[in-house]
């Protein structure tokens, strides 16, 4: 060890000469360390396992306005205990109030272990983020910083980038704005707990602050989104990929990799508004679809157009609801003898100018907000009402399947709503089938499972939708007792692996029978597929071979006139 204590050391023999390791006695080391700790610009407090304060440097006394050890101990421990976000992390930011001043301290907590891996001491390192602490400095700091990670917040990011661009207004340099997102972060919080979630966010902040260049500006934009402003000369792709890799591999060797997605906007010379630049980067980020393996997307002008269309769709929602423009179309489900059993309700937006908008245009947009729940609730009601109007007619025995979105579980009391609907329209619960996808199940497995069991007890039928299109389909069957398995149409697609698809279909149908579930295969388009599925023992079929989704009136006309027997036709183009 080489340590230059310089003028701090009183022994004249040792002034201006480095210590050599062999010259150091234990006492000298302790003395040197104490001097170093005393002169640090950070407060240090060391406790033993019984919370006795065994050491505190001068600054620690000053930071907490105490001059006696016991008072400092009590004051400090009370303060640490009072923090709002109590996580187990080793670093956090915390406000400290003294008389009329509010300061912000960054706290690092480290545990020292003995040889038997038992905690021996706990050391707190306090960094004063508000050196000239007065109320206004504290407020400005808080307005610009994120209390969890200690880095800039969105507001601070806007201000710092604006300042940078003003100061470099004559520069010819190009800049990039990046916004990152953690896929399914909510799910991670649910599965691993908020503490793990918080620790991931803090790590991300550290990775960004430590790995990028000092001139880059980084911020926690909001929630799990981080932002970075990077001059082109620093925009080093290998480094950038390293940063993403580091962020992705935080779950430890046993956990899955986090999926980080990044939207990038290249700042144009005429750009002045930082919020607008961030909107562009966000548009690029939003262009990465849930199922994409893509991690990075650059902004393209077409995205602005798309965002405008999205805005239009969202702003048109309420009016369309009022005007009754959302209608259900019905697609039949039949048995192996082509007998009609029921139908799936699929929504269409029938605009006043006779344009019929298919659901894949607006459902994914509504799914980003609570609008999907308003729409679904309406579709469930239309379906229940339809079942009521069929009572006493030849259609009486039919069921209607409705779709449930992940957000419905979050925003709605699905159980109460379904119960109200069957009471209001006096319909049999078994006539309303509820289609639930894997994403719904994964969004909150415990809650959804309880909901399913409650609904089943009332006699509702539960169908697992799009089975085989997600990641963990098999695992999910272990815990969820559904009545029907809807096999995804992907298995019927013409592929190079036809034979393997066939083997999987065979096994899935066999397995669901053993688990006491009926099977529906979706997307049946040809007679050949129908025969193959019948041979495998599939119970029900849905697909263009029988009918596309059609308006309720056409559905009634088609089957009512046909005595409940389907005709093979795929001419009913929607
Ligand atoms: P989904 O629930 O998997 O519905 C089946 C989709 O497959 C329907 O598309 C249907 O028209 C289509 N389809 C049926 N048979 C065939 C076939 O033989 N070949 C092919 N290529 N496609 C077939 P649609 O009506 O466009 O709906 C698309 C998706 O939109 C639905 O997929 C569902 O996820 C969503 N959706 C539709 N209506 C609602 C709703 O009311 N609420 C919610 N949350 N989602 C809905
Ligand atoms: Ca469905
Ligand atoms: Ca489906």
Image (cartoon, rainbow, N blue to C red):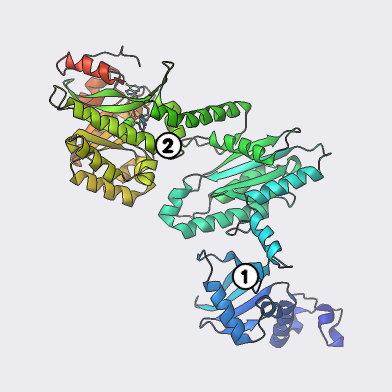
Left or right for 154, reference 360: right
Residue 409 found in image quarter: top left
Left or right for 285, reference 37: left
Graded by Cα atoms within 10 Å as few (under 14), some (14 to 19) or many (20 or more), the crowding at tag 1 reads: some
Residue at horizontal 51 percent and vertical 81 percent from the top: 49
Dividing the image into four equal quarters, which quarter contains ligand 2? top left
Residue at horizontal 60 percent and vertical 66 percent from the top: 94
Does residue 67 sit above or below 451 in this rendering?
A: below
Element under label 1? strand
Left or right for 526, reference 301: left
Cα separation, mark 1 vs mark 2, equals 42 Å
Does residue 82 sit above or below 294 in this rendering?
A: below
Does residue 408 sit above or below 346 in this rendering?
A: below
Does residue 324 sit above or below 208 in this rendering?
A: above
Query: Residue 57 or 351: which is nearer the viewer?
Result: 351
Query: Residue 111 or 38: which is nearer the viewer?
Result: 38
Q: In which quadrant of the rendered image does the C terminus lie? A: top left
Tell me where residue 318 appears, x and y as whole percent.
Answer: 43, 32
First in sequence, mark 1 or 2: give its number.
1
Graded by Cα atoms within 10 Å as few (under 14), some (14 to 19) or many (20 or more), the crowding at tag 2 reads: some
- On whether ligand 1 comes within 8 Å of the CB at mark 2, the answer is no
Residue 298 found in image quarter: top right
Tell me where residue 358 appears, x and y as whole percent.
Answer: 40, 23
Tell me where residue 402 appears, x and y as whole percent.
Answer: 29, 33
Residue with the mark numbered 1: 96
Residue with the mark numbered 2: 371
Query: Residue 198 or 110: which is nearer the viewer?
Result: 198
Element under label 2? helix
Query: Residue 380 or 7: which is nearer the viewer?
Result: 380
Residue at horizontal 23 percent and vertical 14 percent from the top: 568
Tell me where residue 42 appears, x and y as whole percent.
Answer: 69, 72
């Amino acid at each position: 060890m080489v340590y230059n204590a310089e003028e701090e050391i009183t022994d004249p023999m040792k002034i201006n000469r480095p210590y050599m390791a062999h010259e150091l006695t234990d006492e000298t080391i302790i003395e040197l360390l104490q001097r170093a700790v005393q002169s640090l610009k950070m407060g240090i407090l060391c406790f033993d396992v019984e919370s006795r304060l065994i050491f505190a440097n001068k600054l620690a006394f000053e930071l907490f306005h105490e001059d006696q050890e016991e008072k400092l101990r009590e004051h400090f421990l009370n303060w640490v205990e009072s923090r709002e976000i109590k996580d187990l992390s080793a670093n956090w930011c915390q406000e400290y109030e003294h008389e009329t001043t509010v300061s912000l301290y960054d706290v690092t907590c480290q545990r020292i272990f003995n040889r038997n891996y038992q905690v021996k001491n706990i050391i707190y390192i306090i960094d004063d983020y508000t050196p000239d602490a007065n109320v206004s400095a504290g407020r400005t700091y808080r307005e610009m910083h994120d209390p969890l990670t200690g880095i800039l917040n969105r507001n601070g990011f806007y201000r710092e980038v604006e300042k940078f661009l003003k100061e470099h207004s004559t520069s010819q340099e190009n800049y990039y704005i990046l916004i990152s997102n953690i896929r399914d972060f909510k799910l991670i919080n649910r599965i691993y707990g908020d503490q793990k979630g918080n620790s991931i966010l803090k790590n991300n902040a550290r990775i960004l602050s430590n790995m990028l260049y000092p001139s880059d500006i980084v911020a926690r934009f909001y929630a799990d989104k981080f932002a970075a402003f990077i001059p082109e000369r620093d925009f080093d792709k290998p480094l950038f990929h390293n940063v993403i890799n580091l962020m992705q591999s935080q779950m430890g060797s046993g956990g899955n990799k986090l999926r980080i997605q990044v939207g990038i906007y290249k700042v144009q010379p005429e750009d002045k508004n930082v919020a607008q630049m961030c909107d562009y980067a966000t548009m690029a980020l939003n262009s990465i679809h849930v199922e994409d393996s893509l991690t990075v997307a650059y902004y393209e002008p077409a995205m602005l157009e798309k965002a405008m269309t999205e805005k239009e769709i969202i702003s048109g929602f309420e009016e369309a609801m009022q005007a009754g423009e959302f209608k259900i179309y019905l697609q039949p489900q039949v048995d192996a003898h082509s007998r009609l059993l029921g139908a799936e309700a699929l929504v269409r937006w029938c605009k006043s100018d006779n344009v019929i908008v298919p659901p894949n245009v607006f459902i994914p947009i509504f799914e980003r907000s609570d609008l999907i729940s308003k729409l679904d609730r309406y579709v469930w009601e239309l379906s229940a009402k339809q079942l009521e109007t069929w009572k006493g007619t030849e259609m009486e025995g039919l069921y209607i399947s409705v779709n449930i979105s992940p957000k419905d579980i979050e925003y709605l009391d699905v159980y109460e709503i379904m119960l109200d609907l069957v009471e209001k329209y006096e319909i049999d619960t078994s006539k309303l089938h509820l289609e639930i996808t894997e994403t719904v199940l994964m969004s909150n497995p415990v809650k959804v499972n309880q909901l399913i069991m409650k609904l089943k007890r009332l006699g509702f039928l539960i169908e697992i939708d799009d089975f085989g299109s997600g990641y963990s389909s098999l695992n999910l069957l272990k815990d969820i007792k559904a009545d029907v398995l809807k096999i995804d149409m992907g298995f019927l697609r013409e592929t190079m692996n036809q034979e393997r698809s066939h083997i999987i279909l065979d096994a899935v149908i066999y397995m669901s029978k053993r688990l006491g579930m009926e099977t529906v295969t979706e997307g049946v388009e040809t007679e050949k597929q129908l025969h193959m599925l019948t041979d495998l023992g599939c119970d029900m079929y849905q697909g263009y071979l029988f009918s596309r989704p059609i308006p309720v009136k056409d559905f009634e006309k088609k089957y009512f006139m046909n005595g409940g027997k389907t005709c093979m036709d795929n001419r009913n183009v929607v």
